[in-house]
Image (cartoon, rainbow, N blue to C red):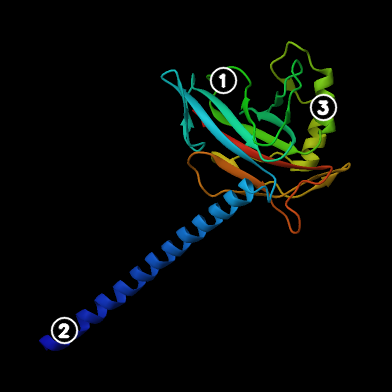
Amino acid sequence: MSQLKAAALACLIAVWIVPAVEGQSESRRQLDRTKNLSEEIRQSYERHQADGLKITIYQLVSNQMRPVNPGQSFTAGDRIKIKFESNFDGYVYVINVTPTGERRLLFPRPSSRRNQVRASQQYDIPTSGEFLFDKDPGLEVLQILMSRSQVYFLEAILDRGSLKSTHVPLDKGALRSLRNLTGSPTRLKGSGIATEIKSKRTAGLQTRILTLEPRREGSILVLASAKGTSRFAPGELSVFEIRLNHY
């Protein structure tokens, strides 16, 4: 009887260990795939094989700017700055979607239309000072558009904006053009960086699906990704979101 019990116990232990080992092997394979994808994206960016941006979010802590994870939560009074670098010559626009759903152009400002970016140069948003989280909680979204050429409907609202304003609300025409490219507004969930916007075409413009580096610490890379070429063609732009949870 004791030998039978021992054999049965050994079988039970073997049955328990095998799935555990298989689970660990699958976790390692997933980790390896993530590392390989991250390295592939990084090399494509550094070798200029695909157009992209390198983004780092900094928070002002004890009078020093420190890089932070975009998935963290922020509180009223926190100050942040976004630094980015492109590996191609082009244009960048930043639209803020407030917790109440208002959309307004933060970058560039009408007074300084310097949103043309050069490869391998670092840029700050905002260009001076920091973004300040106010007392209204919610999900603050920074929608970033990048392209090799100017985006006509955003340039048009800059032409009409006050030179003294820190941001320009998107008018009905610009909102319509933006929604045609990004889709209707949906209830946003979760913080971090999102590239869920699909490829769409409207009025001579086309959005391009992006590839996001899977890492979440330090600088994050966002690359143009499509079948065939990984360069932005004339009239193509990308849209992705930095979602910042504010409570």
For residue 45, say whether it is visible: yes
Amino acid type for the residue under numbered disc 2: Lys
User: Along the polypeptide, which appears first: circle 1 or circle 2?
Assistant: 2
Give me the C-alpha separation between circle 1 and circle 3. Answer: 24 Å
Amino acid type for the residue under numbered disc 3: Glu
Per the rendering, the mark at residue 155 is 3
SS assignment at label 1: loop
User: Along the polypeptide, which appears first: circle 2 or circle 3?
Assistant: 2
Determine whether 98 is above or below 40 in the image.
above
SS assignment at label 2: helix
Relative horizontal placement of residue 164, taking residue 41 as reference (left or right): right
At x 43% / y 66%, what residue is drawn? 26
Relative horizontal placement of residue 116, taking residue 191 as reference (left or right): right
Relative horizontal placement of residue 137, taking residue 224 as reference (left or right): left
Amino acid type for the residue under numbered disc 1: Glu
Residue at the far top: name it: 164
| Nearer to me, 16 or 146 | 146
Determine whether 65 is above or below 181 in the image.
above
Q: Residues within 10 Å of mark 3 (few under 14, many from 20)?
A: some
Image location of residue 181, percent across then percent down:
78, 42
At x 62% / y 25%, what residue is drawn? 125
Give me the C-alpha separation between circle 2 and circle 3. Answer: 79 Å
The residue at which mark 2 appears reads as 5
Cβ atoms under marks 2 and 3 closer than 8 Å: no
User: Along the polypeptide, which appears first: circle 1 or circle 3?
Assistant: 1
The residue at which mark 1 appears reads as 130
Instruction: Give the label, 1 or 2, closer to the camera.
Output: 1
Image location of residue 216, percent across then percent down:
50, 43
Give me the C-alpha separation between circle 1 and circle 2. Answer: 69 Å
Q: Quadrant of residue 12?
A: bottom left
Locate the N terminus by quadrant. bottom left
